């Protein structure tokens, strides 16, 4: 019996690495597209084969994929250009992923986000939540997903699995490591919003496992589909309490200097792009995963304290932090909406 094969675009990135590892460990053959060499965590896996090319070069990408595997069942678009270059890079990258999946007759999978719901996104985000193109990122993501849906008339099967902000996995570049825990070694917890607000988070290893489980049910996903991954919907205070317990000390709370970032954004494009999404920290929100549960059953969900421990290298060092007591762990995780 031949193995299932997934082509992961952007496999050297943070999300791409997590997806590649999850599919490989599930027994899939993984074709890992990247412009740069793959990290050792992937090259050490015999199921992973590197495809060195530019993701926008769809002709070369298709040729390499066909040479490497007789049939590709899934194309996973894990490409994520820098925030400030979305307008320039997101459309051609998405178009290449779509044309490649169509040519291979494969299911196209995309990690989605909450930008689609606009500045006034409600606290509860079921699948039927209206999309509002009132920000630059919302307009781009809505257009991208609309193109995927329209391609169903050409025979493209596709699914968007929408999740909150990433944490965990290998590398850096998320709110979690660039803001919240950037000064943890100094005893400081930096939070961009009100500690009382619920924010949607996705522990990358859990999300990657969900992608594998959805891909395994691709026969049920004809046409275009959207699904929500609830992940950890948690108040900032719960994150703070859990991190303090893991660190074994109280942490000072500092707010993100939004004013400085807005001012700096006048000359630094990446700061300006980050400041544009401040509203996500002013609006409590969580994704509801009813349809995902109907498809795969209970989604992967690592307890919050364990997920945080595995996401912070310092907390993985022996002696830095002892495991939480069962009683405290249960109390903290009970405050998290799965």
Image (cartoon, helix red, strand yellow):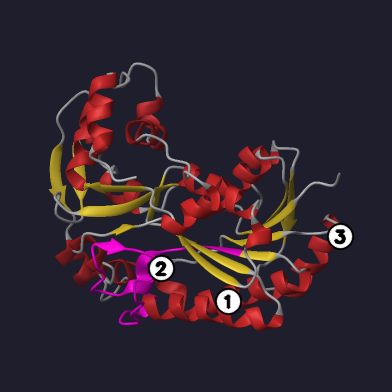
User: As rendered, which of 46 and 216 lies closer to the eye?
Assistant: 216
Tell me if label 1 and label 2 are in contact, CB under 8 Å.
no
Q: Is residue 165 visible?
A: yes
Q: Position of residue 52 (x, y in %)?
A: 72, 58
Q: Is residue 185 visible?
A: no
User: As rendered, which of 313 and 131 lies closer to the eye?
Assistant: 131
Going from N to C along the chain, the mark reached first, 1 or 3, is: 3
The residue depicted at 74 percent of the width and 57 percent of the height is 51
Where, quadrant-wise, is the C terminus in this rendering? top left
Specify whether residue 289 is painted magenta: no
Magenta-tinted stretch: 109-137
Q: Position of residue 108 (x, y in %)?
A: 63, 66
Please tell me whether mark 1 or mark 3 is closer to you in this view: 1
Please indicate whether residue 134 sits to the left or right of residue 45 in the image: left
Residue named by callout 2: 83
Residue named by callout 1: 148
The residue depicted at 45 percent of the width and 66 percent of the height is 82
Residue named by callout 3: 67
Above or below, 88 against 173 in this view is below
Res 114 quadrant in image: bottom left
Q: Position of residue 293 (x, y in %)?
A: 47, 51
The residue depicted at 29 percent of the width and 44 percent of the height is 182
Please indicate whether residue 37 sits to the left or right of residue 306 in the image: right
């Amino acid at each position: 019996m031949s193995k299932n094969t997934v082509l992961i675009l952007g496999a050297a990135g943070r999300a791409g690495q997590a997806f590649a590892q999850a599919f490989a460990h599930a027994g899939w053959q993984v074709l890992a597209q990247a412009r740069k060499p793959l990290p050792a965590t992937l090259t050490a896996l015999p199921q992973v084969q590197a495809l060195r090319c530019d993701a926008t070069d769809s002709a070369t990408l298709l040729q390499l994929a066909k040479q490497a595997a007789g049939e590709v069942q899934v194309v996973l678009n894990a490409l994520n250009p820098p925030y400030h270059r979305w307008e320039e890079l997101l459309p051609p990258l998405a178009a290449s992923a779509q044309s490649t999946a169509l040519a291979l007759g494969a299911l196209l999978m995309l990690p989605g986000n909450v930008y689609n719901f606009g500045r006034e996104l409600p606290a509860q985000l079921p699948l039927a939540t209206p999309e509002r193109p009132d920000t630059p990122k919302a307009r781009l993501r809505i257009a991208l997903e609309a193109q995927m849906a329209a391609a169903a008339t050409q025979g493209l099967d596709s699914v968007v699995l929408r999740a909150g902000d990433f944490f965990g996995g290998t590398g850096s570049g998320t709110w979690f490591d660039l803001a919240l825990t950037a000064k943890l070694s100094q005893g400081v917890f930096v939070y961009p919003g009100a500690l009382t607000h619920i924010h949607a988070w996705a522990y990358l290893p859990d999300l990657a496992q969900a992608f594998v489980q959805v891909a395994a049910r691709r026969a049920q996903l004809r046409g275009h589909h959207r699904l929500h991954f609830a992940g950890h919907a948690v108040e900032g205070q719960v994150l703070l309490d859990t991190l303090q317990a893991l660190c074994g000390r109280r942490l000072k709370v500092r707010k993100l200097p939004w004013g400085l970032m807005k001012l700096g954004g006048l000359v630094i494009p990446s700061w300006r792009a980050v400041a544009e999404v401040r509203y996500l920290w002013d609006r409590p929100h969580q994704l509801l995963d009813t349809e995902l549960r109907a498809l795969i059953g209970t989604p992967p969900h690592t307890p919050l304290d364990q997920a945080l421990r595995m996401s912070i290298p310092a907390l993985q060092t022996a002696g830095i932090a002892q495991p939480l007591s069962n009683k405290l762990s249960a109390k903290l995780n009970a405050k998290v909406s799965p």
